[in-house]
Structures are given as structure tokens and as C-alpha cells.
Image (cartoon, grey):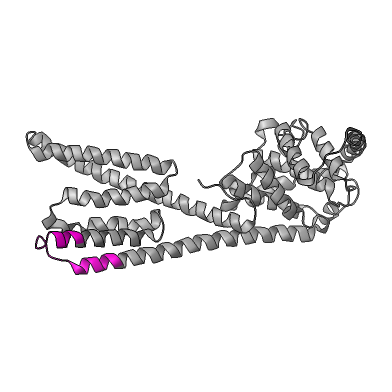
Amino acid sequence: MKKIRIFGPDGQLDDYSRYLLLDYRQKLLRVLLAMCFIIITGLTIVNLIEWIQDPFAEWGTYNLISDGIAFGILFFLYQANQKGFVSLSGWLFGLVVLSSIPLSYPLSSINQTFLTMALPVAVSSFVIQPWASSLFAGFVLVFYNVIFFYYRGTFQYDAFSLIALCILAVASYLISSILNKAIRDAVRAYDETIQGWAKALEMRDSETMGHSQRIVELTLTLAKKLGVGGIDLFHMRRGALLHDIGKMGIPDAILHKPGTLSDEEWVIMRKHPVYARDYLSKVSHLASALDIPYSHHEKWDGTGYPQGLKEEAIPVAARIFAVVDVWDALTSKRPYLETWSKEQALVYIQEQAGKHFDPRVVAAFTELIESKFEIHGNEDTHEDNAHDTKKIAMLVDSQKTLPR
């Protein structure tokens, strides 16, 4: 599948729309090839029965060989389609159908093959691209007219069927184009709804205004650095935007409290990932984006919440996001925590590798941040930052405030 560009939501939406269209075309072509398998199987059974009745008939052996070749071609196309070569499979399917006509019918009977000619014209717009039907229709027109003028008098010119074929090509193009636009519009509507939810949450929690938008790009950049690609990036973007959606169920008195939360308040606060799971799991197109909202407070050593997952049991999207979430919490203004310098925050994250965070993610994040912000402190500065960070970290851990 085509990899999704990570910079700019519009580019991601376009790529996600193309991914959905490709998935839909793959499924449609799979059904079409399966139907062809069924038809060829039926013909093979009939030809086999006839061959058994008259094994010395030349045409019987020829038909069985043809059926075997057809099975081989269909199997190849099916495997290519399953491996993601959807457009290639679609083109080959159409060309095989059209090229089989002069091999299977005498020229005098070519007018009887219009139904077969119509098959690639009708389906190509849906399994390749909307304009593909026009290309196949043009191929049929050229082929038909060349045969007619080269073998003049062999068959009667059927203008009506050719016009009908052209109308079918135009109709296929229009229907496919409308369907493609509907899918793109639906994807954009879903994304705008998600962004609206994220904005509503930030308006309620004004102290973290802009938090979701800030961390999306950094999360996706880090994910790409770690080898995440394709549709997973789009699901991560949605999960990052909605990572705190569960806080809609947390009372304002706890959510906006500037000081330390009590043990009872922490019990309530730690329910927000569960609330997020309950909200989002009921929305089918967001089920794949649930890893971050539900698991971003899990810790590498198993001391996180809500499930207490450990190491590789934590979804990779949540492990990546957890580092970015803490980074933004430390370096942005919060009512319950003093803002840290980028150097201090990076030292803290490095110190938490193997405890709170996946060490591999921390290593990639360190490279990314040092490159992005040109952090190159000398050894003395690094030791001072480490000393200050450890003191603040002790306070953070004692207050259980990083991040809520």
C-alpha cells in the first residue's frame, strides 16, 4: 500500500482516501475473480464430462487445456491482487478478457462477443481508475473497426452495440467518479468531526490549549523515524488528536485542580483512558485509533494504568506517543507543574528509558529532538541539567503529576 505523508492533514486525508479506494477496489476485484473462478469451474466440469463421453474428440482436449490456462491466469491475478497490485491486476484482467475474444470465436461471430467486450469496460472504472473504462472502450472500437475493414464482408457492422458500449463507458466513469468523491467527502467529514472533538476538549481544559495539535506532528515524525508507515500513521494521528477524549468524563474540580490530587481524586482521574475506550470503541471508523487514547499512560516497567501492561505488550503507537506526551507536558505551561527547559525535559526522558518509556523509542526521540532544536550542551551543562532534573523528578513522582 502507498505510504501516507505525515506533514499536513490535507495530504494525510488525500492519502487515506486513496487507501480506502484501493481497499474497496481490491475487494471488488477479488469478488470478480472469484466469480470467474466459479464460471471456469462450471465450464471445466461440462468439458470434462464431454471429454469422458468422447475422449478422442480434438476439441474436447483443446477445451480442457484452455480451461487449465484460464485457471492459471486467474490464480496469478488473484495472488497479485491479494499482494496489493490492484491496478496491475485490473489492467491484466481487462486485457486478458479482450485478447481471448479472437482466440475463442471466429470472425464471423464477433458481434456475439459484445457482452464479453463490455465486461472490462464496465468494471475497469471501479477496479482501476474512473477513466480506465474510456480507454478500454476506445481499444474495443479500434479493434472492432480494424477487423471490420480488414476482413470486409465477414460480418455485419453493429453500430448500435458500439454506441451502447460507449454509453456504458461514460456511465461507468461517472458512477465511479461520484463514488470516489463520496468516499473522500466522508473521510474529510470524519476528520473534521474528530478535530472538533479535540478542540472542544481543549476549550474545556484551557490550560492545555493547543496540546493536541502540537503533539500530532511530533508523534508522527517520531513514528516514521521508528519505521511506522502506511495507514498506521493515519490512525496514530487520530489517536493523538483524541488521546484525552476520556477526560470529558472527569469532573471539572479534578481536571482543573492546580495542586496535588488526592488518592481518591487520582482513582477518578485514572479512569479517563477507560472512558476513552468506552467512547471510541462504539465508533467503527475509530476502533483502529484506540491504542493511544486507551494505552498512553501505560509504562514500560508495568507500573502504568489502566491495564498495567508491560514492555512489548503495550501497543507501539502508545509507546511512541507516551514520550511525546510527557515532553509536551514538561515543556508547556501547566497549572500543576513548572515549565522545564528542553534540555531538562530531554534528560528526564532519557533517565526514564526502561522505566516509563521504551528505550528504543527514547533513543530515536533523543536523536530527533537534538536535531530539531540543536541541543548540544557541554558535559558540565548536561550534569547540571541532570542534577536539577532529578530533584524536580523526585517532586514530580511524589506529587503524581506527570502528566495527568
Indicate the position of residue 313 as horizontal and vertical percent values: 66, 33
Please tell me whether residue 148 is drawn above or below residue 390 in the rendered image. below
Q: Residue at x 55, y 47 (%)?
A: 3
Q: From this viewpoint, is residue 242 visible?
A: no
Please say if 120 is above or below 178.
above
Q: Is residue 158 magenta?
A: yes
How many marks the image carries: the answer is 0
**In the image, residue 387 lies in the stretch drawn in magenta:** no
Q: Quadrant of residue 348?
A: top right
Q: Please give the name of the residue rendered at 65% of the width and 50% of the height, measured from the top-left corner.
A: 237
- In screen coordinates, is 317 left or right of 398? left
Q: 285 or 210: which is nearer to us?
A: 210
- Dividing the picture into quadrants, the one containing residue 44 is top left
Residue drawn at x 41%, y 62% is 176
Can you see residue 143? yes
Q: Would residue 276 appear left or right of 12 to someone viewing this image?
A: right
Residue 149 in the image: state x and y as whole percent: 15, 63
Q: Main secondary structure of the magenta part?
A: helix
Left or right of 295 on screen, residue 129: left
Q: Nearer the viewer, residue 142 or 62?
A: 142
Figure check: 133 above or below 372: below
Of the pair 41 and 174, the residue shown nearer to us: 174
The spot of residue 76 in percent (x, y) is 34, 39
Q: Position of residue 270 (x, y in %)?
A: 77, 44
* Residue at 11% over, 36% down: 51
Residues in magenta, as a range: 146-166
